[in-house]
Image (spheres, rainbow, N blue to C red):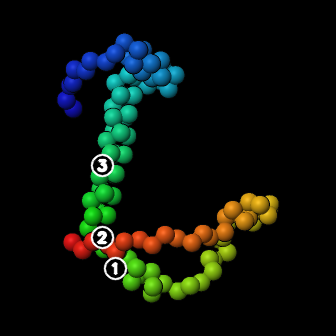
Amino acid sequence: MSAMSLRLPNSLHEAAKDLAEREGVSVNQLVATALAEKLSALMTVEHLRARGERGSRAKFLAAMARAPDLAPAPQDRLPEQKVSNKRLQATKPRPTARRAPARKK
């Protein structure tokens, strides 16, 4: 493990100390965990962005066209909810705007 010197605003340091005490961990462990969570989130976003850039809309649409048009399995269905007519009308599909053709890469 490596050591790191870090400068924090007093208010952030106090908040970290308070939270670490409430959680029953050291400030070091709290900061390391928080940093790991943030790095993981940022790397996930970057991974998804890069993966999306490699994707092909045409291939996606072709795969979706091959998928059968079936009702969901019972365990995948959402529970039925009572919905007022006004709300039901608001959820009806609206005509979609035409999209420009996808750019070829």
Residue 14 rendering spot, x and y as whole percentages: 42, 14
Amino acid beneath label 1: Lys
Q: Which residue is drawn at the image coordinates 63% and 77% (left, top)?
A: 73
Regarding residue 79, the answer to whether it shows in the image is no
Count residues near mark 3 (Cα–Cα under 10 Å), then give few for <14, some for 14-19, many for 20+: few
In the image: residue 5, left or right of residue 90: left
Circle on res. 87: none
Choose the circle earlier in sequence order: 3 or 2. 3
Residue sitting nearer the eye, 4 or 54: 54
Mark 1 vs mark 3: give the one in front. 1
Count residues near mark 1 (Cα–Cα under 10 Å), then give few for <14, some for 14-19, many for 20+: few
- How far apart are the alpha carbons under marks 1 and 3? 26 Å
Q: Which residue is drawn at the image coordinates 34% and 24% (left, top)?
A: 28
Q: Which residue is mark 3?
A: 43
What is the quadrant of the C terminus in the image?
bottom left
Which structural element holds mark 2?
A: loop
Count residues near mark 2 (Cα–Cα under 10 Å), then give few for <14, some for 14-19, many for 20+: few
Q: Quadrant of residue 53?
A: bottom left
Mark 3 vs mark 2: give the one in front. 2
Instruction: Answer above or below: position of 76 versus 90.
Output: below
Amino acid beneath label 3: Met
Residue 5 rendering spot, x and y as whole percentages: 22, 20
Q: Which residue is mark 2?
A: 55
Amino acid beneath label 2: Gly
Q: Which residue is mark 1?
A: 59
Instruction: Answer above or below: position of 88 versus 6.
Output: below
- How far apart are the alpha carbons under marks 1 and 2? 8 Å
Residues at circles 3 and 2 in contact by the CB criterion of under 8 Å: no
- How far apart are the alpha carbons under marks 3 and 2? 18 Å
What is the quadrant of the N terminus in the image?
top left
Residues at circles 1 and 2 in contact by the CB criterion of under 8 Å: yes
